Image (tube, coloured by chain):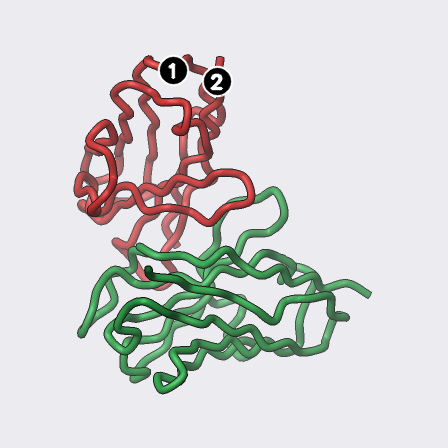
Chain colours: A red, B green
């Protein structure tokens, strides 16, 4: 089972700042990585899949990069609604697909 | 509008059974694979089971094999998760989620989620 390790555990930033979240895989997963956003009491929302593709309706301020074992999610300029928990997820080796433990993005 | 709505959660004793349902609306249900993903209280996400768009294949995580069974009923746009011999570590909010792919192999990415149903296994 592939283990995904996210860092940092918590990121404290202000609206308008740039956020960079990291996700490292225990073995290569190519470009089979997704990012989800989850707010308290809500279901997760798919932000990015295949490392850098955005589903319809996801704002362009969300972007993803990386390959192999190291990946990033960047939010170019934080909006108030972006403060949430973010999870990475791999589908390079299934089943099972696995999620990272999450990064909490909080308002500074 | 597209929706997934879970139901059937509750408090159950260890060793007992429970059946969860996921009702879909607003999209072509028979075109998509469906997954169950769970989240223990205060914890991260854990994939549990998946079923192909045509019901031809299923996948489970090792810890639930032989205890949980996923099935689908296309005429009613419903996916079910039959849970038997429940354990304390099964306590979680259970989400159903739509696979992003259609008419073929699973993509293992989840582009539509329900709000979840809470299962608590406790004596």
Quadrant in which residue A52 is drawn: top left
Quadrant in which residue A96 is drawn: bottom left
Disc 1, SS: loop
- Label 1 to label 2: alpha-carbon separation: 7 Å
- Residue B61 numbered tag: none
Characterize the local packing of mark 2: few (<14), some (14-19) or many (20 or more) Cα atoms within 10 angstroms.
some
Considering every residue shown, the one lying at the far front of the view is B1
Residue at the disc numbered 2: A107
Instruction: Give the chain of mark 2.
Output: A
Looking at the picture, how far across and down is residue A61, in whole percent? Answer: 23, 27
Circles 1 and 2 in contact, beta carbons < 8 Å: yes
Instruction: Give the chain of mark 1.
Output: A
Disc 2, SS: strand
* Residue at x 40% of width, y 33% of height: A6
Q: Nearer the viewer, residue B51 or B5?
A: B5
Looking at the picture, how far across and down is residue B77, in whole percent? Answer: 38, 78
Characterize the local packing of mark 1: few (<14), some (14-19) or many (20 or more) Cα atoms within 10 angstroms.
some
Looking at the picture, how far across and down is residue B22, in whole percent? Answer: 47, 71
Marks 1 & 2 on one chain: yes
Which quarter of the rendered picture does the N terminus of chain A lie within?
bottom left
For residue B2, above or below residue B30: above
Residue at the disc numbered 1: A15
For residue A56, above or below residue B7: above
* Residue at x 33% of width, y 29% of height: A22
Report how many numbered discs are placed on residues in the image.
2
* Residue at x 17% of width, y 43% of height: A53
In the image, taking residue A43 as reference, residue B77 lies left or right, namely: left
């Amino acid at each position: 089972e592939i283990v995904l390790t996210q860092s940092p555990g918590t990121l404290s930033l202000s609206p308008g700042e740039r956020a960079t979240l990291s996700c490292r895989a225990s073995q290569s997963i190519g470009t089979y990585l997704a990012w989800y956003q989850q707010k308290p009491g809500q279901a997760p929302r798919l932000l990015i899949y295949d490392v850098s593709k955005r589903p319809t309706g996801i704002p362009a301020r969300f972007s993803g990069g990386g390959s192999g074992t190291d990946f990033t999610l960047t939010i170019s300029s934080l909006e108030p609604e972006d403060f949430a928990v973010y999870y990475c997820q791999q589908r390079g080796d299934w089943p099972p697909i696995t999620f990272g433990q999450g990064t909490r993005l909080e308002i500074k | 509008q597209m929706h997934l709505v879970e139901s059937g959660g509750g408090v159950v004793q260890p060793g007992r059974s429970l059946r969860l349902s996921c009702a879909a609306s607003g999209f072509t249900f028979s075109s998509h694979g469906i997954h169950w993903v769970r989240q223990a209280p205060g914890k991260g996400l854990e994939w549990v089971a998946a079923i192909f768009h045509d019901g031809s294949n299923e996948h489970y995580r090792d810890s639930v094999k032989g205890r949980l069974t996923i099935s689908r009923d296309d005429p009613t746009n419903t996916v079910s998760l039959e849970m038997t011999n429940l354990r304390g570590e099964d306590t979680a909010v259970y989400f159903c989620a739509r696979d992003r792919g259609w008419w073929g192999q699973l993509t293992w990415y989840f582009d539509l989620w329900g709000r979840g149903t809470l299962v608590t296994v406790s004596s």
